Amino acid sequence: MSRLNPLAVSALALLAERPMHPYEMYQLMLQRREDRVVKVSAGSLYRAVERLAADGDIAESGVEREGNRPERTVYTITASGRDALRSTLEQMLGEFVNEFPEFPVAIGEAHNLPPERVADLLDERAARIRDFADLLDTGLRHIAAKGVARYRVLNVHYTRAMVAAELDWLERTIAELRDGELTWAAPEQLAAASADPIRT
Amino acid sequence: MSRLNPLAVSALALLAERPMHPYEMYQLMLQRREDRVVKVSAGSLYRAVERLAADGDIAESGVEREGNRPERTVYTITASGRDALRSTLEQMLGEFVNEFPEFPVAIGEAHNLPPERVADLLDERAARIRDFADLLDTGLRHIAAKGVARYRVLNVHYTRAMVAAELDWLERTIAELRDGELTWAAPEQLAAASADPIRT
DNA sequence: CTTCGACTATTCCGTGCGGAATACTACGTG
DNA sequence: CACGTAGTATTCCGCACGGAATAGTCGAAG
């Protein structure tokens, strides 16, 4: 009953709705756009299911075959699976763990670039975040129009709030960089700032 | 010249200061408390250095031996290493990539638990985040007292802003859960909410 | 004076992730 | 009606991560 990884939580939550075979979980996750919140890849999903089965959180409840299609193994959640889901959700909600996002590392080392360059880069980032925020907003509007209960999109609201905060911080920091309130001497060897766009 | 991982960025940034052997990088990272921002483990660091060397971003600049201690391989950053550092920093600052944090997954599945239980769990989380915020604040005060330039602790400021935003969202959401504005019917099988503290 | 623990410096190995490969079917299209 | 492309369902394999192991030295304490 060790801590489940996010994909296992999603899978287990689906099986808490009804029995399913892995590929159906995969389709449902994509259909419900869970891939925006969890890293969904078929390989990892099958692996996660395998582990859940090994740990007794789910059990094979039959093998179907439709026409000449490959066999599909249907899994059902077990009592201890429901327990594992509950306990993992409790942990994920109640605890606060550092997940080491990359951006703080980059800001921490930003003094290796000239301050003006950093201001420009943060501007780019801000623009992309604004686009993302717009995406979330239109999504939320669509959903509100459809009358979907708000508890179904709590995570979108959360993400929206975080995105707003980052945008706020970026704007303040960019302003300080531009008016010289915040500055530093960049090392010369790296200072040869290319005007190149970011390589994608 | 593929995108460097965060630990490689830290390592390369150290070598941009002066040549060093891996273990010295390791010590410096811990001494400067970079382990709060980057996942620092000796094994991964040696691996990262190995890869940097293979890619020509750093070069062996000698092998020392002090007394009968194990040999230490000293590395020096190369011109293309400085390039890789700059280009990776530019990417990390300017782009905005989803890193799939775990908490949104948990909120997304929170409707599997009873709303009152979720309110309690979010309260716990909020308490832990407040502790963390206090830690950041005292750290920032110490640093300000020492007269350290602000650009050296930009990432702490960023983290502080994010933490404040999350706390804000949590408080609003907890309030809505408590006054019933936000609610749902939890599935019965999982609803058997244990009053147990989180297993750590 | 010897033993124990802490530090120095690095290697190793199990585990898990995820992109790619596989293999077969159904469907549309010229 | 041959052919290509999209969908179904799953397996496989390489590589990166990080905790543990290794192997030596130095200092302190009993």
Image: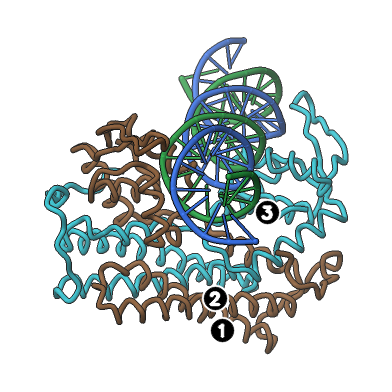
Chain colours: A brown, B cyan, C blue, D green
- Point 24% across, 58% down: residue: B121
Rounded to the nearest angstrom, the CA distance separating label 3 from label 1 is 26 Å
Label 3: chain?
Answer: B
The answer to whether residue A149 is left or right of residue C23 is left
Earlier in the chain: of badge 1 and badge 2, it is 2
Q: CA–CA distance between discs 3 and 2?
A: 25 Å
> Given the current orientation, which residue lies at the most extreme bottom position?
A179
Real-space CA distance between mark 1 and mark 2, rounded to the nearest whole angstrom: 15 Å
User: What crowding class fits label 3: few (fewer than 14 Cα within 10 Å), some (14-19), or many (20 or more)?
Assistant: many
Give the structural element (helix, strand or loop) at label 2: helix
Q: Are marks 3 and 1 on the same chain?
A: no
Q: Chain of mark 2?
A: A
Residue sitting nearer the eye, A111 or B71? A111
Where residue A187 sits, quadrant-wise, is bottom right
Q: Which amino acid, mark 2?
A: Ile
Q: Which residue is mark 3?
A: B10
Q: Residue at x 26, y 59 (%)?
A: B110
Q: Is label 1 or label 2 in front?
A: 2
Answer with the quarter of the image where residue B152 lies. Answer: bottom right
Question: Is B124 placed above or below A59 here?
Answer: below
Q: Residue at x 32, y 32 (%)?
A: A53
Residue found 32% across the figure and 61% down from its top: B108
> Quadrant where the C terminus of chain B lies?
top left
Q: Which mark is residue A172?
A: 1
Three-letter code, disc 3: Ser
Pinpoint residue A180: horizontal percent, then vertical percent.
70, 86
Q: Judge left or right: residue A110 versus residue B127.
A: right
Dot 1 crowding, Cα within 10 Å, few <14, some 14–19, many 20+? few
Using a 10 Å C-alpha cutoff, classify the residue at mark 2 as few (fewer than 14 neighbours), some (14 to 19) or many (20 or more). some
Residue at the disc numbered 2: A129
Amino acid residing under circle 1? Arg
